[in-house]
């Protein structure tokens, strides 16, 4: 999905590319390395809910235009947020 131009296929959830890397970072910053090691040893790849001891801030940026290496890119404004500015 992350290699596609149009990725607005969710029903309100936020999809994360490299979710395993994000989970590993969260486990380490929360002091949960032992729990992560046990999860890896089990070999099961199932969804697991792990409460964090400290809250983290998540910033979501919605962009319909951006500049990358001198090229201006545009995407459809699927939520019609551009008209509100």
Image (cartoon, rainbow, N blue to C red):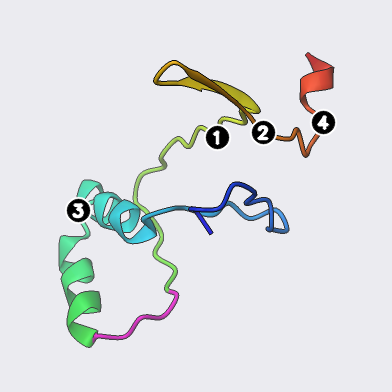
Give above or below for 53 relative to 71.
below
Q: Secondary structure at mark 1?
A: loop
* Label annotation for residue 31: 3
Drawn side of residue 68 relative to residue 29, left or right = right
Q: Are marks 1 and 2 in contact (CB under 8 Å)?
A: no
Q: Secondary structure at mark 2?
A: loop
The mark closer to the camera, 3 or 2, is 2
Separation (CA) of disc 1 from disc 2? 16 Å
Q: Which residues are magenta?
A: 43-47
Which residue carries the number 2 mark? Answer: 75
Query: Which of the two labelled residues, at mark 1 and mark 3, occupies the earlier sequence position?
Result: 3
Instruction: Say whether residue 10 is magenta.
Output: no
Label 1 crowd bin: few (<14), some (14–19), many (20+), radius 10 Å: few
Query: Which of the two labelled residues, at mark 4 and mark 1, occupies the earlier sequence position?
Result: 1
Q: In the image, residue 19 lies at what x, y percent? A: 38, 58
Query: Which of the two labelled residues, at mark 4 and mark 3, occupies the earlier sequence position?
Result: 3
- What residue lies at 17% left-to-right and 61% top-to-bottom? 33
- What residue lies at 77% left-to-right and 22% top-to-bottom? 82
Which residue carries the number 4 mark? Answer: 80
* Label annotation for residue 60: 1
Q: Quadrant of the N terminus?
A: bottom right
């Amino acid at each position: 999905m992350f290699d596609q131009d149009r990725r607005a296929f969710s029903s309100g959830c936020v999809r994360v590319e490299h979710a395993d890397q994000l989970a590993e970072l969260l486990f380490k910053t929360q002091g949960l390395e032992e729990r992560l090691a046990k999860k890896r040893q089990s070999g099961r790849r199932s969804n697991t809910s792990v409460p964090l001891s400290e809250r983290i801030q998540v910033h979501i940026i919605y962009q319909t235009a951006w500049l990358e290496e001198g090229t201006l890119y545009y995407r459809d404004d699927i939520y019609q947020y551009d008209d509100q500015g």
